[in-house]
């Protein structure tokens, strides 16, 4: 399955007039300090062509018309590439293609045609201590930013772009680095992990930079500092269950976790220690 | 769209004293020691098919291993201490990661579905607790004879017969061994990942190897008690 499932459609498609009726059970929580609860909303006239976020927009319009507080949720590009949107839909991160748990998708690229008329849909925020709820479905994912700040970068002189062929990169490494670099930092790995571990996210970054020549000077410090930071943020530990990779909208593989562990053990042997 | 900005609300996370990956390495290395022991233990158990004298002789050999260079049961006690240390390290890492996971998500989802997790990986923790309880009973039964009708004075072979002629005892043993098998199924794969030895190419092989080792050990351990229960060994 590709990011967009909107293929060309015949203009005479009969589904144009068909609408769905769904029952939403949405997690409502005023702020991080308050207790939340599931609140039920009925929604008529949902088009199967709406994205999940558009359906939430319709719900919010309805709530505003009724004088109620709209449901807060995060979103930005709505093209499946920014990583801002992300909620648990019926117990799966990003809904994960719904009927079949194997489809790689972000919430914005999940469409209402994946649901049936009359469905009851549970919508919850990512749940992790390191991702405190801001309001309703929106969570604070700055813990990821701090993991990146701990080592997810390379130090290069800026200025004139260097000659592109000056630093050769083997095709295999370039491909694997790119696969890891497709991580959009949405947090689905943490949300889906039974331990609420951020290992797949950190491993994707370590793999991405560690496979490229530009990432070598800081390779040992990077892995040690990023792992230390993810523990500090209050994420759980990885037990290699594989829920993260299955939930990942970019299909980051479990191989990256093995590579992180390999790099970490090598770095510790080489004397790298986390900066405090 | 509601935009909410908060500052200073986020409580300072408790700094992890030990890296979660370090805990996993402790888990993996102690697990490997225990798997190697299980292989040796299974081979020893199968001596039951060689008869009473062979089995008791094997048991004596274990207790006098290394003689006369090492006095008495020195070698056996060294092995026991290594195993005890491995078990303690394994449990420490498990409890520590379990607590970390609990802190990392104190309130679970109202609805949560699994996409990938195996039954084996889901039962690692409680399965481990049951296995630990079994090991204590197992030692009381067959090593010390405290809960065995033959008592400590009977020969190892007689204690084994007394225990496995009882269907309840065999049932508990079988459940524990099957749990050990599932524990190994996920554990071997997980240890390979933790020690950084897996990759996309090897992943399939590692998983097949984990299943194969777990299956061979489970069947190897079940063979002796069921043979005794059905009167094939007496």
Image (cartoon, coloured by chain):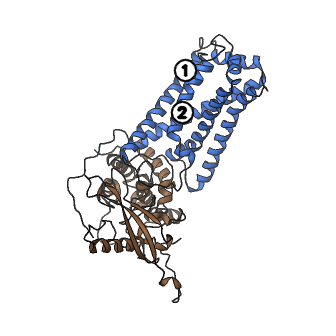
Chain colours: A brown, B blue
Q: Chain of mark 2?
A: B
Give the farthest residue toward the bottom: A12
Q: How many numbered marks does the figure carry?
A: 2
- Name the residue at 43% across, 39% down: B23
- Badge 1 crowding class, 10 Å Cα cut-off, few under 14, some 14 to 19, many 20 or more, is few
Task: Please tell me which residue lies in front, A83 or A218.
Answer: A83
- Precedes in sequence: disc 2 or disc 1: 1
Pick the front one: B14 or A261: B14
Residue A183 at x, y percent in the picture = 42, 63
- Residue B167 higher or lower than A230, as above or below: above
The image shows residue B226, relative to residue A176, as above or below, that is above
Seen at 52% across and 35% down, the residue is B128
Q: Is residue A165 something one can see in this rendering?
A: no
The numbered disc on residue B130 is 2
**Left or right placement of residue A117 versus residue A62 in this view:** right
User: Which residue position is annotated with label 1?
Assistant: B78
Q: On residue A262, which mark appears?
A: none
Q: Position of residue A100 (x, y in %)?
A: 55, 64
In the image, residue A70 lies at what x, y percent? 29, 68
Residue pictured at 59% horizontal, 56% vertical: B201
Are the residues flagged by discs 2 and 1 in contact, CB closer than 8 Å?
no
**Circle 1 sits in a helix, a strand or a loop, which is it?**
helix
From the viewer's perspective, tell me whether residue B91 is left or right of residue A129: right
What is the quadrant of the C terminus of chain B in the image? Answer: top right
Decide: is B192 above or below B89: below
């Amino acid at each position: 399955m590709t990011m967009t499932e909107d293929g060309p459609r015949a203009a005479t498609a009969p589904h144009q007039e068909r609408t769905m009726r769904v029952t939403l059970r949405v997690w409502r929580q005023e702020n991080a300090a308050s207790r939340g609860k599931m609140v039920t909303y009925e929604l008529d006239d949902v088009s199967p062509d709406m994205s999940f976020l558009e359906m939430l927009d319709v719900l919010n319009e309805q709530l505003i018309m009724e004088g109620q507080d709209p449901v807060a949720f995060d979103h930005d590009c709505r093209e499946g590439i920014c990583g801002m949107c992300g909620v648990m839909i019926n117990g799966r991160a990003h809904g994960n293609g719904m009927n079949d748990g194997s489809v790689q998708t972000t919430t914005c690229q999940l469409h209402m045609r994946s649901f049936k008329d009359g469905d009851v849909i549970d919508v919850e925020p990512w749940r992790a201590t390191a991702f405190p709820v801001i309001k309703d479905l929106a969570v604070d994912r700055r813990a990821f930013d701090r993991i990146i700040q701990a080592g997810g970068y390379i130090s290069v002189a800026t200025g004139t772009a260097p000659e592109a062929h000056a630093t050769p990169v083997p095709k295999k490494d370039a491909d694997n680095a790119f696969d890891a670099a497709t991580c959009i930092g949405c947090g689905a790995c943490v949300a889906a992990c039974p331990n609420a571990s951020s290992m797949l996210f950190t491993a994707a970054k370590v793999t991405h930079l560690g496979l490229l020549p530009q990432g070598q000077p800081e390779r040992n410090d990077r892995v040690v500092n990023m792992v230390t930071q993810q523990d500090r943020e209050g994420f759980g530990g990885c037990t290699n269950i594989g829920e993260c990779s299955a939930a990942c909208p970019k299909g980051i593989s479990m191989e990256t976790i093995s590579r992180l562990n390999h790099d970490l053990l090598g770095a510790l042997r080489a004397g790298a220690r986390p900066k405090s | 769209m509601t935009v909410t900005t908060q500052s200073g609300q986020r409580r300072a996370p408790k700094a992890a004293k030990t890296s979660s990956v370090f805990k996993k390495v402790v888990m993996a290395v102690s697990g490997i020691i225990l798997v190697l022991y299980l292989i040796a233990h299974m081979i020893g158990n199968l001596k039951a098919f060689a008869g009473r004298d062979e089995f008791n002789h094997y048991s004596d050999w274990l207790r006098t291993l290394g003689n006369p260079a090492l006095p008495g049961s020195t070698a056996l006690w060294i092995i026991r201490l290594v195993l005890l240390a491995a078990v303690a390290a394994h449990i420490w890492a498990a409890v520590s990661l379990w607590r970390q996971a609990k802190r990392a998500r104190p309130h679970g989802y109202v609805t949560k579905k699994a996409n990938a997790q195996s039954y084996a990986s889901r039962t690692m923790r409680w399965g481990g607790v049951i296995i630990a309880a079994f090991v204590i009973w197992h030692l009381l039964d067959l090593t010390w004879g405290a809960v065995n009708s033959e008592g400590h004075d009977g020969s190892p072979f007689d204690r084994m017969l007394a225990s496995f002629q009882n269907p309840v005892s065999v049932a508990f043993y079988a459940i524990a061994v099957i749990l050990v098998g599932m524990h190994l199924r996920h554990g071997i794969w997980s240890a390979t990942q933790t020690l950084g030895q897996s990759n996309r190419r090897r992943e399939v092989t590692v998983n097949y190897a984990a299943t194969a080792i777990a299956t061979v050990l489970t069947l190897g351990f079940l063979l002796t008690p069921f043979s005794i229960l059905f009167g094939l060994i007496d």
